[in-house]
Amino acid sequence: MNFKVLLPQAPSELRHRLQRLINQSLEMAPAEKKTLPVWRADFFDVETSPFWLNLNASQKSYFLSSMSKALLKEAISIEHAGIAYANKMAILSETQEEREYYTTVANEELSHLYLLQPYFQFQVDIEAPEFSQLIAHFVENESKRDAIILIQVLLEGWGIHHYQALLAGTDNHELKEAFSKIVFDEVRHHGGGIILSQSYGINLSADLVKNIQSVIDAVRVGPFQVAVLLADLNRLSSIPEITEMLRSIQAEQTTGAKLKLVQQNLAKILSDSDLKRFNWQAWSITEMSQIIANSVDNSKSEDPSTAASL
């Protein structure tokens, strides 16, 4: 099956006609563009860092706006992948109950997408973040049994905690309600993945180990986007400076806590000996600093205070 996850939009006239039918099915009013919600500084663990406190008001606004756009772009892209995943799994279902289950999951993922899309618009097939492209790759290429473990057990288990944090970190009450709905559904999607993975049996093949490790590695690297942007705004270029900045935002502690959450989700279906096959060691603060130093290009950094005046 040649299955594409991140699809382009239809031509304008057809898109609008189909949109009306989708809105009627979901019993939702046509989505109107909404003001970009901004997550608080404490969500990014920067609020007490001197590298945050040293920024002027315009730079702080630029940081929060940029990071909030990144959060929404990733969440929206992942919901697109979730719809595709559920549709594919409905086709591959082996029982009537399984098909019905995945049909309800697809409808819920579509509802999630329509709750989030009004806050940020972009071309998902072109601009999807790297992490959501990894998820799309899993949906498109992995076997049904492996996909259940990767998508529902590992990633939707992670998603429960991530969306709970998104809910707590924004002051937008309407968006809080949306994330509350998403968390409620994700708990059931994750639970269904555990039931189905245990029903089909778990074969921890070399390919599956590799794919799970790729997700773990995305966490091991630490708060990459936050650190790169904060380093860029502070004009940091040396390893010692960036190391100090990473310590000020507690990069090692937060990364360790996130790795523990990932491990706890996998422990629901894997044995202790299976879990030992993975590298759970967070990158050292020096390794994180080197990666960030290589990613920061101070010579091309836009001064947000200048941009705000244009």
Image: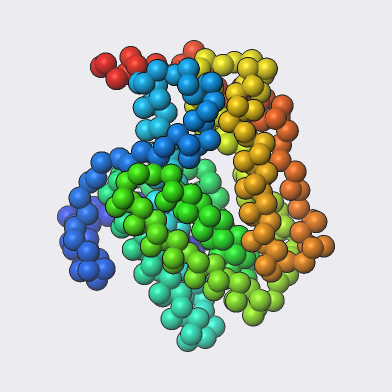
Seen from the viewer's position, the closer of residues 45 and 240 is 45
Judged left or right of residue 82, residue 306 is left
| Place of residue 173 in the rendered image (x, y in percent of width and height, measured from the top left) | 31, 50
Q: Residue at x 29, y 52 (%)?
A: 174
Hey, which quadrant is residue 293 in on the image? top right
- Farthest residue, direction bottom: 96
Image quadrant holding the C terminus, namely: top left
Q: Residue at x 35, y 44 (%)?
A: 171
Seen from the viewer's position, the closer of residues 213 and 43 is 43
Hey, which quadrant is residue 221 in on the image? top right
| Place of residue 159 in the rendered image (x, y in percent of width and height, measured from the top left) | 52, 56
Q: How many marks?
A: 0
Judged left or right of residue 113, residue 229 is right
Eyeballing the image, is 258 above or below 53? below
| Place of residue 9 in the rendered image (x, y in percent of width and height, measured from the top left) | 30, 52
Hey, which quadrant is residue 291 in on the image? top right
| Place of residue 214 in the rendered image (x, y in percent of width and height, measured from the top left) | 65, 49
Is residue 262 something one can see in this rendering? yes
Is residue 144 something one can see in this rendering? no
Q: Residue at x 58, y 68 (%)?
A: 148
Q: Residue at x 79, y 63 (%)?
A: 272
Judged left or right of residue 210, residue 136 is left
